[in-house]
Image: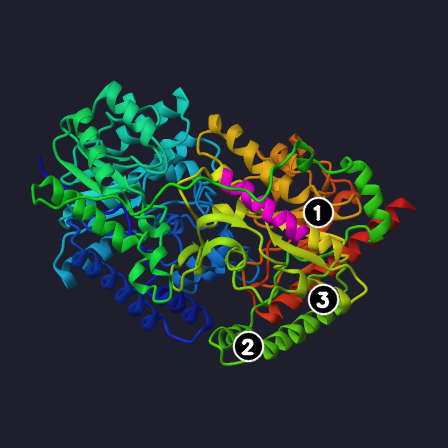
Amino acid sequence: MKWTRTAIGYPYIGDNREWKRCLEAFWKGDVTEDVFLQQLKDIRLGRLKRQMDLGLDYLSIGDFTMYDRMLDTAVMFGMIPSRYAAESRESDLSVYYAMARGAKGAVACEMTKWFNTNYHYIVPEYEGQKLSVTKNILLQWFKEARDELGIVTKPTMIGPYTFIKLAKGFENREAFAAEIIPLYRQVMAELSEEGAVWIQLEEPALVLTLSEEEVAFVKSVYAQLIVEKPACHIMLQTYFEGLSAYDELVNLPVEGIGLDFVSGYQQNIASLKQFGFPAEKVLAIGIIDGRNIWRANLAEKAELLNSILDQSKAGDVWVQPSSSLQHVPISTALEQKMSDDIKRLLAFADEKITEINQLVLSFNDIGLPLGGNGRTTQKASSERAVTPDDFKRPAPFPVRQEIQARKLNLPVFPTTTIGSFPQSKEVKETRKAWRNKEITDETYAAFIERETERWIRIQEDLGLDVLVHGEFERTDMVEYFGEKLAGFALSEKAWVVSYGSRCVKPPIIHGDVSWLEPMTLKETAAAQVMTEKPVKGMLTGPVTILNWSFVRDDISREEVAYQLGLALRREIECLEQAGIAIIQVDEPALREGLPLRKADWEKYLRWAIRSFRLATSGVQNETQIHTHMCYCDFHDFVKPIEALDVDVISIETSRSHGEFIHSLQKTPYEKGIGLGVYDIHSPRIPSEEEMLEIMQDSLEVLEPRQFWVNPDCGLKTRKEEETVASLRHMVHAAKQLRSYMKMRQF
């Protein structure tokens, strides 16, 4: 048996987020295109050298990106929407980043979650364009690694079925496949001609629930793709769950199949027991968790590996992480301040590759002893017992709506923002100086108060109806709370990519979570004193904190969610007692935590919704509870949103407005809803006219009394001048809508 050590993908961000800084410097015009491309090349080659040093046998290319890999594939195939015609005349990079971030007169392509992760991809749009391989970027990177480093790499790309599944705009799937598949064949043929031995096609969509019709379509796609046996081998790679329709799809005309034996352990093991594995194929065994950060129990993993080999009777095998390592930080070696008691329990990307090495060495009779992971299972504890009444608001929504309308006395179509305002260079540097103890607590608090008051005045000047304090004291919407709750640990450099160049540093939940002291009261109450308009209290919800953290795995996620719900309930009580009339508890990650199979949704949604209601149901009828979700498929999620029993939900509609309207035509929503009328992830300033059009269209499916107006997400990443100009247009559009409605009534 031949053992091969490999990884599906490796982080591209860099130890110190060099990739992010490189992109943002180019966007600002601080470096030329030639310098930018050379910097990216240096990063690509550097990460390959690092993996070579770590001992992998096959290294991947194509797991790198200049923004997003779905976008890379679309642009490589010339799938460029017509609204980017102006950018197409400038340069390839101009149109590429216009699709990702928007441009003058052209909104960005839709962005949504990558399966059940916190990564967001750009949705390819097909308009009937003439498609062709405009530039085989994989070939360029393959030759680059061969010529500069002397290695034959494993090109990897999003597989054809997953690309078709996630793209939009076509009416006939089979016809679209007929356009796409020859392009895949061309890319693969060119790579094969240059000496590629294996090409990896990533097909995570094959772990979704597949109907008989979809299974037949997958088989048709691969029959068209493999018209004749190519010179190179194809590894069909799945991850995030077990392979659906295993008995049929395992026999697709490819030389290898990659299976996830972490998230997809139960189903893939059961499939192996029932159907075996084709002896002529290579089995890629995803055995080290590619999405969490705890050290593996290698003794248990060795037993599992033995069991897989016994069940599969596989010949050659690849041993690898269960998914791309882009979902975990790079190396624990970068953590210099973390407690040794926590650090010794962790394995980031580099350490996971080391675990792969240790497993393979142990099976090659090197005599390497394999131990546990140093962790002991703990019994969860809770602040207090909960009762059924803890999950219910005092009165139903229609009663609350009338009470809150009288108390708040807001105009029709009230305007607000999602919560955060731009974190300027001064804000970041002052916070850093405070953390480094270069300035006193008093100096820092005075700065935060001045910045808060400045933005309160800006909001008043703009004419917003409900204000926010701006969150200048917060680095991240989850990390901030992880710093203040018991049971969390924070890192220095454990960064992962959320979308584009936006990076987050998830906190680590290692113990029981509990509330220690007020976390948001000081800044929120201070802001409310500064204005007569209502100021929203701003919290991150329990499910988002859970899904955007690295979570302990010695108790269930449900138990952790309830602990978070109780902790946030205490915080909400503090805000309400201080007179804060509107409290927003954001849950952008509620939907992304859904299991990939719909059959498993009900169980997850039951405890996820209950944890949110545990946090928010203790308030009086007068207190208005808001939540926020962004970039999720709204059409099949209306009922769970209703079950949250919030008074107002704000959502993204700017990039996918037509789909939102269609959803509410099919499934009406009766509570308050705040429309994200412009895209904050784009640097462009939207016009009043385009926002007004979104608002007017939405009145087809919403009653005026339901309707709030807001951006589609927080404004932390935007520049001040962009923010002020965009909000001014938004408020003016809302006022025009009020005038329009008033004229209609008379």
Residue 580: image location, x then y, percent:
75, 56
Q: Is residue 560 magenta?
A: yes
Please say if 626 is above or below 95. Answer: above
Task: Give the labeled residue for mark 1.
Answer: 625
Residue 11: image location, x then y, percent:
32, 55
Tell me which amino acid carries mark 3. Ala
Q: Is residue 345 magenta?
A: no
Q: Residue at x 34, y 63 (%)?
A: 335
- The magenta region covers 559-572
Chain-order first, disc 3 or disc 2:
2
Query: Helix or strand or loop: what does disc 1 sit on?
Result: strand
Mark 3, other Cα within 10 Å: few <14 / some 14–19 / many ≥20: many
Chain-order first, disc 1 or disc 2:
2
- Of residue 540 and residue 21, the one placed in the foreground of this image is 540
Task: Give the labeled residue for mark 2.
Answer: 426
Viewer can see residue 144: no
Rounded to the nearest whole Å, what is the CA distance between mark 3 and mark 2? 20 Å
Residue 679's tag is none
Please say if 730 is above or below 110. Answer: below
Chain-order first, disc 3 or disc 1:
3
Task: Give the labeled residue for mark 3.
Answer: 527
- Of residue 526 and residue 647, the one placed in the foreground of this image is 526
Please say if 405 is above or below 391. Answer: below
Contact (Cβ within 8 Å) of mark 1 with mark 2: no
